Image: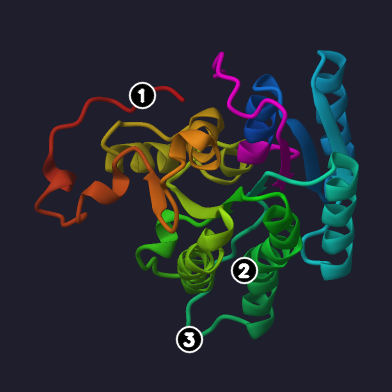
Amino acid sequence: MTTSLKRFAGKVAIVSGGADGMGAACVRQLASEQARVFVLDVKHEMATALAQELSDNGADVTALKADVMDESELRTAIANAIELGGGVDTLINVAGGSASGLVSEIDLGVWDRLYKLNLRSTLTACQCVIPAMRDGGGGSIVTMSSISGLRGDPDWAAYNAMKAAILNMTQSLAWEEGQYGIRVNAICPGPVASERMLATISDAHVAEYAHAIALGRLGKAEELAQAILFLASDQASFVTGTSLVADGGLTASTAQPTSWAKLPRKPAKPI
C-alpha cells in the first residue's frame, strides 16, 4: 500500500529495525514520499538489499549496520546518518522484540535483554537525534509501543512492562521537547501478520486472533506503516504525547466471555 503524497520530500528519516516487517514498510513508504531514508538494522544484508532495491528505483536510501542492543554501535550509526543526511527530521523506532515468561519464574536475564532491546534502545536513539532536531528547528519521533503496553497479558509481563514504559517515556519526551518543535508520539499495534509471526503460530491460533479482532483479521505491515507515518508527518502537526492504537478493534472489547466470545462471527478473513 502506497500513496501519492509527498509529505516527506526533502526530509531526512531514520528507521531503526527497518530491514523487514513494519520497519521495511515504513522505509518503502518514506522512500515513495521522497524522503532521504537511513535504514538501521542488525540484519545488515537484508537492509542493504532493501536499500539497493529502492535506490535502483530512484529513491535515496542508505543501510547502516546497527545492533540496537549495542549502545556504542547504535550511537555511531545514528551519528553517521545525521552527518550524511545533514541533519534529521524524523526518527521511527521499530526495532524491538518479545519473550514470554511468568513473573514468578522469568529469568532476570530475559528481563534485562528485553529492557535493552526495547526500552533502552528507544531511549538511546531519542538521545542521539534530539540535539540535531533542536538545531534544525524541530522534528518528529515515533516510538514503538504495543497494545500490550496498555493492558496486561499473562506470561508476557516483561514485554508488557517495557512497552508500557515506552508510552510513559513518550509522554515525558513530548513535554520536554515540545518547546523545541519536536513532536513525540507512540504507535500501539495489535497483531500483525508478519513473516516472523506467521512462522511461529499455527493457523488455528491465527483464527483465534481473527475472532477476537473486530475487523476479523490480523493487520498488515503496510497498514501499520500508514499509521506510523501519519504521526511522523506534518499532517499530525498538533499531535504530540499521544499513543495511536492500530489493532483492528481488538482492545475495543473487554473480552468478557459474555460479550464477543458468543457473538456470531463470519469466518476469518484471509490475510
Residue 228 visible, this angle: yes
Could you tell me what secondary structure mostly forms the magenta stretch? loop
Neighbour class for label 3 at 10 Å: few (<14), some, many (≥20)?
few
Q: Earlier in the sequence, mark 3 or mark 2?
A: 3
Q: Amino acid at mark 2?
A: Leu
Say if mark 3 contacts mark 1, CB within 8 Å. Answer: no
Q: Residue furthest left?
A: 258
Q: Amino acid at mark 3?
A: Ser
Q: Position of residue 113 (x, y in %)?
A: 69, 73
Identified at 38% across, 47% down, the residue is: 245
Q: Is residue 195 magenta?
A: no
Q: Earlier in the sequence, mark 3 or mark 1?
A: 3
Q: Position of residue 103 (x, y in %)?
A: 48, 82
The quarter of the picture where the N terminus appears is top right
Report the Cα–Cα distance between label 3 and label 1.
37 Å
Residues shaded magenta: 1-23
Which residue carries the number 1 mark? 269
Q: Secondary structure at mark 1?
A: loop
Which residue carries the number 3 mark? 104
Identified at 66% across, 40% down, the residue is: 23
Q: Position of residue 88 (x, y in %)?
A: 74, 46
Neighbour class for label 1 at 10 Å: few (<14), some, many (≥20)?
few
Left or right, 23 with respect to 215, comes to: right
Question: Looking at the rendering, which quadrant does residue 20 occupy?
Answer: top right
Identified at 73% across, 55% down, the residue is: 135
Which residue carries the number 2 mark? 119
Q: Position of residue 75 (x, y in %)?
A: 84, 62
